[in-house]
């Protein structure tokens, strides 16, 4: 039995009010995400249940029950408050996926400060831009990341506290540095959790910035209403599940669905603090008997590249539901997972700004490989015309994905960029900036981001269909399609391809791939050129940065690449 058994019926009966009631929330009440994910779960009698199963790169495991997590987050909240940090201050988390990152996240919220998670792999510059924009008061980090922070101290007088979680002695502390050792903190059974209300700011996420400068999307405590129910319906989490979200909390998937959503549901989740290898990932699933797995297309393509032999070495029979987020999920990847795991990856679509899932493939619904699925109940999601931004309701016609504002997890502003925020709302709709079409059954089909769409002789071609066709070729591991300048057609399609191990680039292979995709694509979408590359430029969250490839091709400034994976 799934948490929802009929999509249509759920759409009919769904109200946000009923979710509020399910959570015991009434308008005007205090609502604090830290409390919702710990104390509330304990009050419901689930304190002894495991909340966190954490494993490091050498296989060491630590676990926390909801009750232990409740106490440790109290202690952290108390520690931060004692230090002089005030509600509304920004506290940055700058750590690998260590337990303190997860406990710190909830502790910061419990004392009313705004949590600003950043990828620990960010270099000095990326870090500084974001701390500067947020005027961050405190940063919680590990010893190994200190050099990057010490580097920028001169220009960051607003940054008053540098809190280190893995330092034992005070001898080597420098200016503004403090120790937070959760093992030695007083265990606080009670903490006067900050009385945040629905609109109190909670999480500040800097978007991964595939385009333009990083922007700080500000979320509020009320978002937990959306995150709770989308986790329950779209990821189908139930009390016996062992859930694994592979995302780093440096981006929104790692917080909305790697912290808030699952824990507000009282679910056990696993964290692997270690780099990617197919062997490591499958062993992790096997060892902890993971049942529900939420990951990203980049990771899935990387697993596809490693092949099936490594899968056969592991018992993955615990798995029951797979979902994907972050980028278009190619049909090929869905069919592959069906073949090798005996179940399909279920695509979900949303953004940093939306805070929670917008379109998903629900477990009770037939999956159409290559489609993002259908809108979440209670959310009005449609398409607006690309030029006029008027709403339309025509099947198979490409438009911009738009949502009627008002769902609980919607961002409330871009920090310091209110005009940019306002520009996202047109004709009563929030515009996502992505293009898609809707088929006769109401399924959404992704075409491309507004700025990735290729204009060839006045015809608009989305990179997704080209990349999906390429991916079906057995030698192709990854691909990106962009528009290359052309004096006759304005743009022509150029494809970049990274090959799977065991394949060599050659003119022969290029021709073979061209012939292979010719049968699948319209003539307009056919690449005029293929370039073989070792790997594609990606953001830290695994998103292909077509903009970087395009800028090179056009001889333009690459722009902000602070989130680029190999830009340290
Ligand atoms: C952009 C949002 C919410 C976590 C994702 C990263 C693209 C996301 C899909 C999907 C096609 C997708 C869109 C979107 N995207 N999911 N299922 N199919 N495209 O959040 O960094 O704010 O990026 O990622 O372009 O707008 P983000």
Image (cartoon, rainbow, N blue to C red):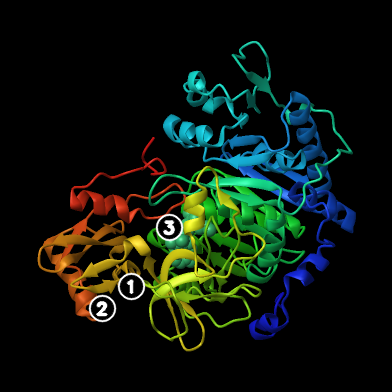
**Residue 199 shown left or right of residue 525 in the figure:** right
Please report the residue visible at 20 percent of the width from the left and 68 percent of the height from the top: 527
Q: Please, what secondary structure does the residue beneath circle 3 have?
A: helix
Q: Quadrant of the N terminus?
A: bottom right
Please report the residue visible at 63 percent of the width from the left and 44 percent of the height from the top: 55
From this view, report whether residue 162 is shown above or below residue 428.
Answer: above
The CA distance from mark 3 to mark 1 is 16 Å
- Residue 465 tag number: 1
Please report the residue visible at 78 percent of the width from the left and 43 percent of the height from the top: 69
Foreground label between 3 and 2:
2
Tell me which label, 1 or 2, sits earlier in the chain: 1
The CA distance from mark 1 to mark 2 is 8 Å
Counting from the top left corner in percent of width and height, residue 449 is at 38, 63
**Residue 378 shown left or right of residue 512 in the figure:** right
- Residue 298 tag number: 3
Tell me which label, 3 or 1, sits earlier in the chain: 3
Quick one: which residue is furthest to the bottom in this view? 440
Which of the pair 343/265 is nearer the observer? 265
Which of the pair 461/119 is nearer the observer? 461
Counting from the top left corner in percent of width and height, residue 399 is at 40, 75
From this view, report whether residue 64 is shown above or below residue 166.
Answer: below
**Residue contact at pointers 1 and 2, CB within 8 angstroms:** yes
Tell me which label, 3 or 2, sits earlier in the chain: 3
Quick one: which residue is furthest to the top in this view? 171
């Amino acid at each position: 039995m799934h948490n929802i058994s009929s999509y249509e019926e759920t759409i009919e009966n769904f109200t946000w009010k009923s979710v509020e009631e399910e959570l015991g929330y009434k308008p005007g009440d205090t609502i604090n995400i830290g409390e919702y994910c710990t104390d509330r779960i304990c009050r419901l009698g689930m304190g002894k249940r495991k909340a966190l199963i954490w494993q490091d790169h050498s296989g060491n495991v630590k676990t926390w029950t909801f009750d232990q997590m409740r106490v440790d987050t109290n202690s952290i909240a108390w520690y931060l408050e004692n230090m002089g940090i005030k509600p509304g201050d920004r506290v940055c988390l700058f750590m690998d996926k260590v337990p303190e990152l997860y406990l710190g996240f909830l502790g910061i919220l419990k004392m009313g400060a705004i949590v600003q998670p950043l990828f620990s792999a960010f270099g000095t510059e990326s870090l500084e831009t974001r701390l500067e924009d947020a005027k961050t008061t405190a940063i919680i980090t590990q010893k190994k990341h200190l050099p990057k922070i010490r580097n920028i101290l001169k220009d960051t007088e607003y940054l008053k506290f540098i809190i280190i979680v893995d330092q034992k002695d005070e001898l080597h502390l420098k200016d503004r540095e403090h120790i937070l050792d959760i093992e030695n903190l007083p265990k606080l059974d009670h903490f006067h959790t900050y009385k945040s209300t629905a609109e109190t700011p909670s999480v500040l996420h800097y978007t991964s910035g595939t385009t333009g400068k990083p922007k700080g999307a500000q979320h509020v405590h009320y978002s937990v209403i959306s995150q709770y129910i989308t986790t329950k319906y779209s990821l189908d989490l139930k009390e016996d599940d062992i859930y694994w979200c592979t995302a780093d909390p440096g981006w929104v998937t790692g917080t909305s669905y790697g912290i808030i959503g699952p824990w507000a549901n009282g679910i056990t989740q696993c964290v692997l603090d270690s780099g990617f290898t197919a062997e490591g990932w499958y062993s992790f699933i096997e060892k902890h008997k993971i049942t529900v797995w939420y990951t990203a297309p980049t990771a899935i393509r990387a697993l596809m590249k490693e092949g099936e032999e490594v899968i056969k070495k592991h018992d993955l029979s615990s798995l029951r539901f797979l979902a994907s987020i972050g980028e278009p999920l190619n049909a090929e990847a869905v069919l592959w997972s069906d073949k090798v795991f005996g179940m399909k990856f279920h695509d979900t679509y949303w953004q940093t700004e939306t805070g929670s899932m917008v379109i998903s493939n629900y477990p009770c619904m037939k999956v159409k490989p290559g489609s993002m699925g259908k809108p979440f109940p209670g959310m009005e999601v449609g398409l607006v015309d690309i030029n006029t931004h008027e709403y339309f309701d025509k099947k198979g016609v490409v438009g911009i994905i738009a949502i009627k504002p008002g769902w609980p997890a919607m961002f409330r502003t871009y920090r310091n960029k209110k005009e940019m925020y306002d520009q996202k709302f047109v004709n009563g709709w929030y515009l996502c900036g992505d293009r898609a079409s809707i088929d006769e059954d109401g399924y959404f089909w992704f075409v491309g981001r507004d700025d990735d769409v290729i204009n060839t002789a006045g015809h608009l071609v989305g990179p997704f269909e080209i990349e999906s066709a390429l991916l079906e070729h057995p030698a192709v591991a990854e691909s990106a399609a962009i528009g290359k300048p052309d004096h006759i057609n304005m743009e022509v399609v150029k494809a970049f391809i990274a090959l799977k191990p065991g394949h060599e680039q050659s003119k022969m292979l290029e021709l073979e791939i061209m012939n292979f995709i010719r049968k699948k694509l319209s003539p307009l979408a056919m690449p005029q050129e293929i370039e073989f590359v070792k790997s594609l430029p990606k953001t830290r969250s695994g998103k292909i940065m077509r903009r970087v490839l395009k800028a090179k091709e056009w001889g333009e400034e690459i722009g902000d690449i602070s989130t680029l994976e190999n830009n340290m």
